[in-house]
Image: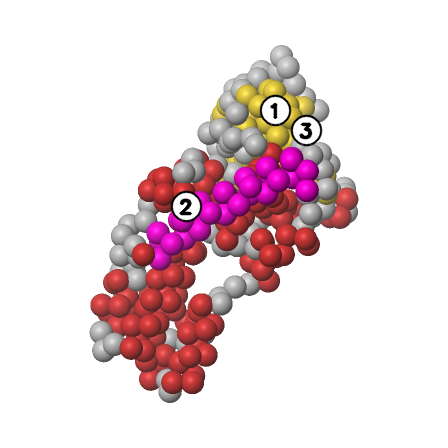
Amino acid sequence: MNTTTAVQRQTELAYRTRINRVMRYIQDNLDEPLRLQALADVGGFSPFHFHRTFAAYVGETLAAFVRRKRLIRAARQLVNTAEPITTIALAAGYETPSAFAKAFKRDAGVTPRALRAANAPLAALIFNRLVMATSAEKVARTPMNRRNLPMHQQPDIRVLPNQQVLYVSRKGMIDQNFTQAAQAAFGILEQFLRDHHLQNKWQYCLGITPDEPGVVPPTECRFDAGYILCEGVEVTPEGEVAFQTLPAGRWAVFLHRGSYETMWQTWNVVYRDWLPASGEQLREAPPYEVYLNHPERTKPEDLETEIFIPIQ
């Protein structure tokens, strides 16, 4: 093993150790608010990017991990104590028993009352289902499956100035992607371009995701559809159309080839595999995507997208 490889593995081990520290803290403090800033501090991470790093390593978002750990504790209480279900629901972070029952059935496959009434073998089966709760997508994201998603390339490092982006924002993340929100936002933005005769006066088409489902509920996560206009082109935004600025700085740029629906795989490889081994540090700016071809004129497997990661 050469020196570079040894250092990379040491760095990756340090990342895993810090993530494990956060996971243990969560397990030991389920009655606490467990806010993002506090958890990032426990692991020594910047809160701005911590949710992405956590999800890439653990295989589920920070919020989902906390919720599942609280439901596992609730399952133990249902089986081993006579605590009222309402009390257990409140301790798990749910305001009403009905909300608790809905979440519990979604993850465990049965209602809290059914678990409490189950015989020991069935209760053990249900409990194990909660402990091992996962999905095919989550399994694909976990570190033990990293060989399925190799990082074939080193990023292109670019230093960019402030960039003005003409954009429209829409909310809603479904099944790990913003397809519906993106279509709605781009529909409004492209109509604006047509109305102002700007169809051929832009340089880049991009998507910015300022929120994360690990922090914000997926239905409330924003997708900003944007265009960077050609130099010298001026327009006055109106209605839902506005300008925002991408801050100047260094960016690590990765190329994703394939469907937008599998983009999360490349994102996770970047945060889980490349970042710890690179020695780079993230800076507080939103990452974004630049779409190099049009989905209506390109087969999904031939789509190309550049992913821009802000680095110091």
What amino acid is at disc 3?
Asp
In-image side of 54 versus 177 (left or right): left
Q: Look at the numbered disc 3 and give the secondary structure of its residue.
A: strand
**Local crowd size for mark 1, using a 10 Å CA cut-off: few (<14), some (14–19), many (≥20):** some
Tell me the residue that label 3 is attached to: 156
Residue drawn at 46 percent across, 47 percent down:
17
- Vertical position of residue 92 compared to residue 299: above or below: below
Mark 2 vs mark 3, CA separation in Å: 29 Å
- Which residue occupies the foreground of this view, 248 or 179? 248
Q: Look at the numbered disc 1 and give the secondary structure of its residue.
A: strand
Quarter of the image where one finds residue 76:
bottom left
Q: Look at the numbered disc 2 and give the secondary structure of its residue.
A: loop
Tell me the residue that label 2 is attached to: 215
What amino acid is at disc 2?
Val
In-image side of 95 versus 37 (left or right): left
| Magenta highlight on residue 173 | no
Q: Position of residue 31 (x, y in %)?
A: 27, 56
What amino acid is at disc 1?
Ile
| Nearer mark to the viewer, of 1 and 2 | 2
